């Protein structure tokens, strides 16, 4: 995976968005990561919001992107409003065995997947 700086505009066809999608597809079932961790792993540590923007646009991308596995740095389901239906993000995570209470990941440190470490092992 090549690491390039994020685009200056939010274009869902951008190479940065594709890099985000490819990396999110690597998040293991039952694990979560953060927008900032993804941005840092892609070589753009200041681009957490751009990662979020990319994930907000991924619902029609194929193959599917498991965006429900990405939360904010505190383990909050900050992207839940971009999923259809009430509680869809929570329900998807819970179906994978991730405990969620009050829209926050329980035992966040235990289920956190660090993409920088994982990429080093690939």
Image: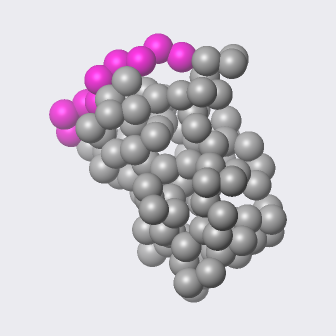
Please tell me which residue is depicted at 35% across the width and 19% down the height of the picture: 4
Q: Please state the extent of the stretch shown in magenta in the rendering.
A: 1-9
Tell me the quadrant of the picture where the N terminus can be found.
Answer: top right
Q: Is residue 69 left or right of residue 45?
A: right
- Which residue is farthest top? 2
Please tell me which residue is depicted at 61% across the width and 60% down the height of the picture: 108
Is residue 27 found inside the magenta-colored segment of the image?
A: no
Above or below residue 44? Residue 78 is: below
Above or below residue 45? Residue 112 is: below
- Which residue is farthest left? 8
Above or below residue 16? Residue 75 is: below
- Magenta-highlighted stretch: main secondary structure? loop
Is residue 2 found inside the magenta-colored segment of the image?
A: yes
Q: Position of residue 64 (x, y in %)?
A: 65, 47
Residue 100, picture quadrant: bottom right
Residue 57 can be seen in this image: no
Q: Is residue 59 left or right of residue 121?
A: left
Closer-to-camera residue (98/1)? 98
Closer-to-camera residue (2/40)? 40
Please tell me which residue is depicted at 62% across the width and 81% down the height of the picture: 101
Closer-to-camera residue (99/109)? 109
Q: Position of residue 32 (x, y in %)?
A: 62, 52
Q: Position of residue 74 (x, y in %)?
A: 45, 62
Please tell me which residue is depicted at 68% across the width and 53% down the height of the picture: 111
Closer-to-camera residue (63/27)? 27
Q: Position of residue 30 (x, y in %)?
A: 76, 55
């Amino acid at each position: 995976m090549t690491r390039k700086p994020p685009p200056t505009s939010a274009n869902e066809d951008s190479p940065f968005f594709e890099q985000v999608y490819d990396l999110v597809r690597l998040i293991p079932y039952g694990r979560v990561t953060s927008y900032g961790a993804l941005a840092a792993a892609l070589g753009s540590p200041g681009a957490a919001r751009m990662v979020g923007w990319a994930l907000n646009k991924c619902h029609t991308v194929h193959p599917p992107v498991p965006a429900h596995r990405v939360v904010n740095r505190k383990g909050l389901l900050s992207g839940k409003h971009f999923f259809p239906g009430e509680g869809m993000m929570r329900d998807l995570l819970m179906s994978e065995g991730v405990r969620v209470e009050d829209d926050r990941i329980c035992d966040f440190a235990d289920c956190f997947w660090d993409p920088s470490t994982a990429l080093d092992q690939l």
